[in-house]
Image (tube, helix red, strand yellow):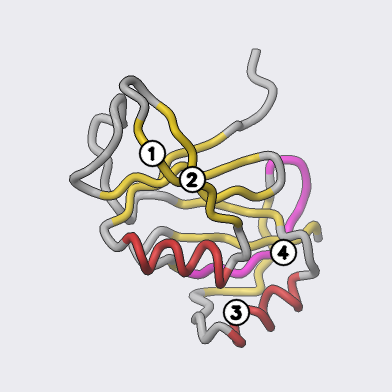
Amino acid sequence: MIDHLDHLVLTTSRREACVDFYTRVLGMQLETFVGGTPPVERQAFKFGHQKINLHVQGSEFEPKAHLPVPGALDLCFIAAIPLAQVIERLAAANWPIVEGPVLRTGATQKIRSVYVRDPDFNLIELSEPA
């Protein structure tokens, strides 16, 4: 029944720091769009054929998760560049690696990963096929 993930929603308590991390550090594109009823201007991080819609804690859009809280996500992204270059980019951005590189089991194959935390302390896994 399900083919693929279209988007997910990230709740942040630190909008500017969140935008900086996902755009400057991870290289996603910030998109502004109009959505909802009534129509409201919103923002999302775009990458590939997916996006992460952004909610600011206390100003979430309806409908929303029952208990939207910052720091509750554990996300894994497959990088478009080799993991060595991901590590170099993180170092250049002065963004600390929590763990890795380590071997993990991904959705379709073995992956090599490093882990970082975003400004809301969500766990972000950055990976390449092993």
Quadrant containing the N terminus in the rendered view: top right
Helix, strand or loop at label 4? It is strand
User: Would you name the residue on which mark 4 appears?
Assistant: 112
Asked if disc 3 and disc 1 are in contact, CB closer than 8 Å, the reply is: no
Q: Earlier in the sequence, mark 1 or mark 4?
A: 1
Place of residue 61 in the rendered image (x, y in percent of width and height, measured from the top left) = 30, 33
Q: Are marks 2 and 1 in contact (CB under 8 Å)?
A: yes
Alpha carbon of mark 2 to alpha carbon of mark 1: how far?
A: 7 Å
Counting residues from the start of the chain, the first of labels 2 and 1 encountered is: 2
Could you say which is closer to the camera, residue 13 or residue 100?
13
Mark toward the viewer: 3 or 4? 3
Task: Say which mark, if any, is on residue 90.
Answer: 3
Residue visible at 70% across and 40% down? 49
Nearer the observer, 39 or 126: 39
Query: Which residue carries the number 2 mark?
Result: 32
State the extent of the magenta-drawn residues as a range: 107-116
The residue carrying mark 1 is 41
Q: Position of residue 64 (x, y in %)?
A: 31, 30
* Residue 15 in which image quadrant: bottom left
Please state if 54 lies on the left or on the right of 116 as rendered: left
